Amino acid sequence: MTGHSITLTAIGRVASSREQPDDDDWDLVKATIHLDSGQVDPDATAGLDGFTHIEVIYRFHAADCTKTERGSRHPRDRADWPRVGILAQRAKDRPNHLGVTICRLVAVNGLDLEVTGLDAIDGSPVLDVKPVMAEFLPRGELRQPSWSSELMRDYWRRTRGC
């Protein structure tokens, strides 16, 4: 099987105070997704304000393409965690450099979406936005290895002073 190329056009961009993809403390990051009126109509966000959360698909545009991992590695380069495949991680150095995050929707102002907890840096191209519906959340019990819980311990930690 050989891969084939696809072309995606961003429907918007992230405006955020975070300019570096630091690993932790994303919980209180405030950002605005500026949707492109050339890609979506002004009424594309109608009804979105009825949801508390949205799922944002974006591209890790600042990732170094020469560091793309196609096999396995230690998460965050920590040798005390097991070497696992890139598809068992949510790291930026993955094929296609796509990020997917569920974040809180604070406000909808036309084609501007104010959010918190979006772990995308300033300028990230947004490929799609979807409302989070309870029926699409995981059904049944979740399982994950202990190293992943340790890795995520401070990921959503509130920033100091808050």
Image (cartoon, helix red, strand yellow):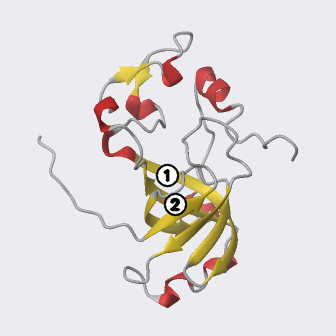
First in sequence: mark 1 vs mark 2:
2
The residue under label 1 is which amino acid type? Val
Q: Are marks 1 and 2 in contact (CB under 8 Å)?
A: yes
Residue 76 lies left or right of residue 27; in this view the side is left
| Badge 2 element | strand
Name above or below for residue 130 compared with residue 142.
below
Name the residue nearer the viewer: 140 or 69. Answer: 69
Residue 12, how many percent across, how many down?
Answer: 45, 69
* Residue at left offset 69%, top offset 53%: 29
Instruction: Point out residue 70 in the picture as x, y percentages from the top left corner.
Output: 29, 30
Q: Residue at x 72, y 48 (%)?
A: 27
Q: Give residue 100's mark.
A: 1
The Cα atoms of the two marked residues, 1 and 2, are separated by 6 Å
Residue 13 in the image: above or below residue 99:
below
Residue 120 horizontal side relative to residue 109, left or right:
left
Q: Nearer the viewer, residue 158 or 21?
A: 21
Q: Name the residue under label 2.
A: 56
On the rendered image, what quadrant is the N terminus found in? top left
Three-letter amino acid code at the position of disc 2? Val
